[in-house]
Image: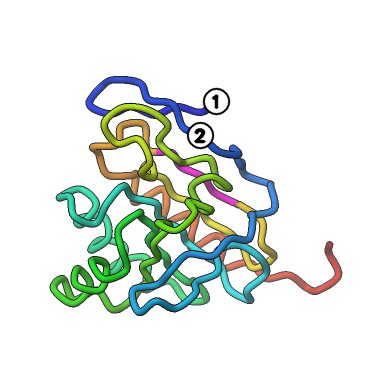
Amino acid sequence: MATTKLKGNEVKLAGNEVNVGDVAPVVHVVGKDLEDIQIGGQKGCAQIVVAVPSLDTDVCAAETRKFNEEAAKIENAEVIVVSMDLPFAMKRFCTTEGIENLKVGSDFRNKDFANAYGVLIAEGPLAGLTARAIFIIDVNGVIVYKQIVPEITEEPNYDEVLEAARAATSTSCCGTCQ
């Protein structure tokens, strides 16, 4: 079972742990306008999936603003921030913060994303929320990058994520590989 930390205390993560090289599970989350957002699968572009506990925290808000600004500049990529926040709260956050370059998706209904990607916090005060994590899925639907942030209260390694995202979008398949 994977773990992370919350204020220095280890917390277990539940769900199916996925790793680099695995086919990304196809799941659906609810967008801010109640639309369906698919994560995983072959979408014709790379996906940068950013899991956060809640947009209503300083660290999650800062991370979302940063990805709105930086990762959204990467061509042939779709950036999706996933949390357990209700779609209405996500919409209000995006409007207030001027978030227009990425999608936000809520996993509140069935926790399908958190369980399929192994980032459901299983214990402690944040049990039931998503851990802070990033997955990059290439155009073929394969996970090419994974970062479970070691301390939930800290931001991810942006440089590493953005470099991996650029690498994932700069390669294209000739159509002969499986």
Question: Is residue 41 toward the left or the right of residue 79 in the image?
Answer: right
Q: Is residue 111 above or below residue 173?
A: above
Element marked by disc 2 = strand
User: Which residue shows up at 60% across the image and 62% down it?
Assistant: 40
Q: State the mark number for residue 49.
A: none
Question: Is residue 79 toward the left or the right of residue 151 in the image?
Answer: right
What amino acid type is highlighted by mark number 1? Met
Q: Which residues are magenta?
A: 144-148
State the residue in front, 12 or 45: 12
Q: Quadrant of the C terminus?
A: bottom right
Q: Residue 13 location in percent, x, y?
A: 46, 32
Q: Residue 45 location in percent, x, y?
A: 58, 73
For label 1, the residue is 1
Q: Main secondary structure of the magenta part?
A: strand
For label 2, the residue is 14
Q: Quadrant of the N terminus?
A: top right
Q: Is residue 7 above or below residue 95?
A: above
User: Which residue shows up at 30% across the image and 32% down it?
Assistant: 151
State the residue in front, 1 or 86: 86
Q: Residue 129 location in percent, x, y?
A: 36, 44
Q: Residue at the top extreme?
A: 9
> Which circle's residue, 1 or 2, is located before the other in the chain?
1
Q: Are marks 1 and 2 in contact (CB under 8 Å)?
A: yes
What amino acid type is highlighted by mark number 2? Ala
Q: CA distance from mark 1 to mark 2?
A: 7 Å
Element marked by disc 1 = loop
Magenta segment includes 91 = no
* Mark 1 crowdedness (10 Å alpha carbons): few <14, some 14-19, many ≥20: few
Q: Is residue 151 above or below residue 68?
A: above
State the residue in front, 28 or 65: 28
Magenta segment includes 145 = yes
* Mark 2 crowdedness (10 Å alpha carbons): few <14, some 14-19, many ≥20: many
